[in-house]
Amino acid sequence: MNDIKVVIEKLSDQGINLDIEQIAFLEEFIEFDSIYKPKRFFFRKKSIGNIYLWGPVGRGKTMLLHAIQDCYFSNSSKFHFIEFMQLVHNKLADFSGTSDPLIKVVKHLSDDNKIIFIDEFQIEDIGDAMIIGTLIEELSNSGIRLFITSNSHPDNLYKDGLQRAKFLKTIDFINKNFFVHNLSGFEDYRLREIAKFDSSGEDKNGDKSVKDFLLKTFNKDISNQTKFKLNSRKFNCLGCSDKVLWISFSDFFSSPCASKDFIEIVKMFEWVFINNFHICSDDHIDKIRRFISFIDIAYQENQKLKLFCDSDLINNLYSGNQLENLWVRTESRLHQIATTKYLQNLEKN
C-alpha cells in the first residue's frame, strides 16, 4: 500500500468524488500506515496503528474508513458504537462469574479480528465510560488496531459526565496512542450527495433503489426496522434508525397520523425519505390533508427531507377540488424541497 489511488478509484466507481480535506486525510493515513509495525512482544509500545477520525456530522468519516478497510484490510469488523457496546455487555454477561470477564471479552474480540472499526464513538453512559477505557487499552495492547469515528475531539468525550475524572486516563490514552485527525470543513458530504441525486426515473424511486441508495449513503441497512413509535403508538415504515426515517407516502399517510405525530418526527429524525407516491383525488382527502400538514411542519422546521418521485408527479399529485386552496402552497413547497438548492440552504443554516 503506497498511494491512495485504489481508494479514490473505488469511491469514484460509486459516483463519489472526494474533496480536498478528505483526500488530505487519505494521504496522511497512507504515510501514517507506511510506518506502522505489528506489535511484537518486546516492542509493544512502538506499534501504534490506531485511527481516531473526528469532525462535523456528514463529512464522510464513516465512508472514508469503510473504503480504507474494504480496499486494504480484509480481516476486520465494523460496528456502530451502540452495537459494539451491546456486544460487549452481552459477552460480559456470558463470562459473568469468571475472573477478569472484560479480559475474556478482549480475547474473544482479538481471536476474530485484526482491526475493529467503531462508528459514531460518543460516550453518554457512565457504565460505558467505565468499561470502554480498559477495553480500548487492552485491545490496543493485544495488537488489535482500532479505527474510530466521532463527532468529538477526544478531549471532549464524555464531557460533563458523572465521575468524568475517572475517564481522563482513557482520553490521555487515545491522544497518545491514536492517529487523531480532524476532518475539518463544513460541507455535509451526505447532504451534498443526497441533494444532487436525481430520483425522477422509475428505476430510481422504487423500494429496492431507495434501499440501495440509503445503504450507500449511510453505510447502514435500515430496512430491517419496519416499525417506529410516535406518541406511544407504532407506525409502519420502510426503514428507520436513530437518525433516519424512510416512509411510504401510500402507506404512512393512509394511517391515522396527525400533526402532533409530524412534530415528533422532525424532533426525532435528522433525515426523512419518502417514496411510493401516487396520484390522489378527493377520494384520498384524508391522506392529502395529512400530507399537507406534514409538509407544512417539515418545511417550517427546516427538516432534511428527500422525495423519491418523478418531478412531473408533483404537478399532478393532487387533482381534487376540496383542498385546492391549501394545495397550491404545498405544491410550491414540494417543488422547492425537490431542488438541490433546498438541501444546500439547510447546510448553511
Image (tube, grey):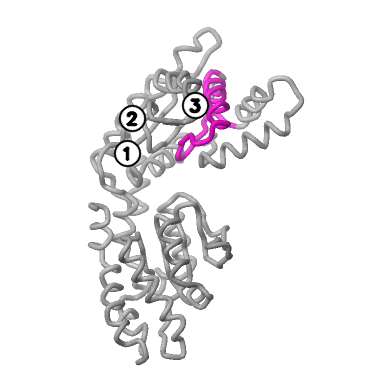
Q: What stretch is highlighted in magenta?
A: 113-141
Circle 1 residue: 5
Q: Earlier in the sequence, mark 3 or mark 1?
A: 1
Closer to the camera in the image, 181 or 328? 328
At horizontal 57% and vertical 62% (from top left) the residue drawn is 232
Q: Where is residue 307 in the image (x, y as percent from the top left)?
A: 37, 68
Residue kind at label 2, given as amino acid type: His
The secondary element bearing badge 3 is classed as strand
Relative to 144, say whether 214 is above or below.
Answer: below
Residue kind at label 3, given as amino acid type: Arg
- Mark on residue 15? none
Q: Which of marks 2 and 3 is nearer the N terminus?
A: 3
For the residues labelled 1 and 2, the Cα–Cα distance comes to 20 Å
Circle 2 residue: 181
For the residues labelled 3 and 1, the Cα–Cα distance comes to 23 Å
Which is in the foreground here, disc 3 or disc 1? 3
Residue kind at label 1, given as amino acid type: Lys
Which is in the foreground here, disc 1 or disc 2? 2
For the residues labelled 2 and 3, the Cα–Cα distance comes to 16 Å
Circle 3 residue: 145
At horizontal 28% and vertical 72% (from top left) the residue drawn is 333
Q: Position of residue 347 (x, y in %)?
A: 26, 53
